[in-house]
Amino acid sequence: MPKPIKVGLLTNADGAHVSAYLQALAAAQDCSKVILGDSDGKWEDAARRTLGEKLAGVYRNHQELLATESPELALITLEAGLTPPVIQRALDANCHVFAEKPACLRARDFEKLTRHADSKHRHLMLALANRSNSEILAARQLIHSGQLGKIYGLEMHLIADQTRLTRPAYHRQWFAQRSRSGGGHLIWLGIHWIDLAMFLTDAPITSVCGFTANVGGQPIDIEDSAAATLQFSNGTLGTLTSGYFLDKGYHTHIKIWGAQGWLRIQTVAEPRLQWVLNSGDNAGQVEVWKPVQRESGYTPFVAAAIKACAENTTPPISNVDSLRALKTVFGIYESAETGRAIQVA
């Protein structure tokens, strides 16, 4: 049996989703110890409360942690522009890497890191955790079983609240400043649906055409609205609307049509998954997914990532899929800036 591994959590005061990662690490059976690299000292008390005896050390310097502790996996959650050199140091220390998205300001920076990870046979996993949602896995199984037939097209939206953009405290955070974040809603939230489109259909996006805007008019230099058309390697066409439009909460939707039926996914409302097939005992009837137990969020995704590192098995997201999601997002940004379709190489 593989032994549980040591995980280094490398962050600072501006790290995103740190509380969720602490909970995920506490629950992960394949994580034996956590070493916290907290350069500002913000998270130490929370880590001690959440991790208990699993917290085996605290450092203020990330490089010192990597050199001294040699964790098998580095979980990195930092401001986008600060992340690439920390990933580089973790890979140089022979760590697998799990990185909070977007983990870079330019796709070429992450591409360089991906090549380095590949050369060292290390996982470089972007935190696109919706892949582990139970309804996503059920929908993927339905598609991969062939019951929907050839996939013809898809449409998606991921909509969050405009309210957050009105707060001065939000304006000061790194993900509200393009020079520090790389972009707005599309790179922070829309990227999840970009990745799911490829994960569900098992086809990479090869060409994009997009628009971005600040439709709410708040004093920020990131987009609060993005719309894109997508072409996949298998000929499928799709659309995405990605924006901060609501007063509160989320609206989520993925609909996929195939030659033999269709399915619809909602991740924040019931029914989470429904479908119609053109043949079989229930032909033409709307069927609803009824799980025995539903999993979602960072806990199952982080657990899968740690397990893959401990057992040297397939990770929940590959190096190439992590890079493809980023290349697609930056391709949409380039299309919006140039007014032309962009090939995603």
Image (tube, rainbow, N blue to C red):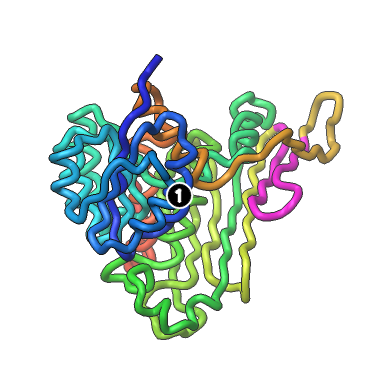
What residue do we see at 71% from left, 54% from top?
269
Residue occupying image coordinates x 47% and y 42% = 232
Q: Is residue 151 left or right of residue 103?
A: right
Q: Residues within 10 Å of mark 1 (few under 14, many from 20)?
A: some
Whether residue 97 appears in magenta in the rendering, the answer is no
Q: Is residue 131 visible?
A: yes
Residues rendered magenta in the picture: 260-276
**Residue behind mark 1:** 50
- Image quarter (top left, top right, bottom left or bottom right) of the C terminus: top left
Quadrant of the frame with the N terminus:
top left
Q: Provide residue 282's location: percent of width, then percent of height.
A: 85, 30
Above-or-below relation of 286 to 3:
below
| Residue appearing at x 45%, y 46% in the figure | 128
Tell me where residue 117 appears, x and y as whole percent: 22, 35
Question: Residue 300: horizontal and vertical position, in percent?
Answer: 52, 38
Residue nearer the viewer, 58 or 9: 58
The answer to whether residue 345 shows anywhere in this view is no
The answer to whether 218 is drawn above or below residue 242 in the figure is below
Q: Amino acid at mark 1?
A: Thr
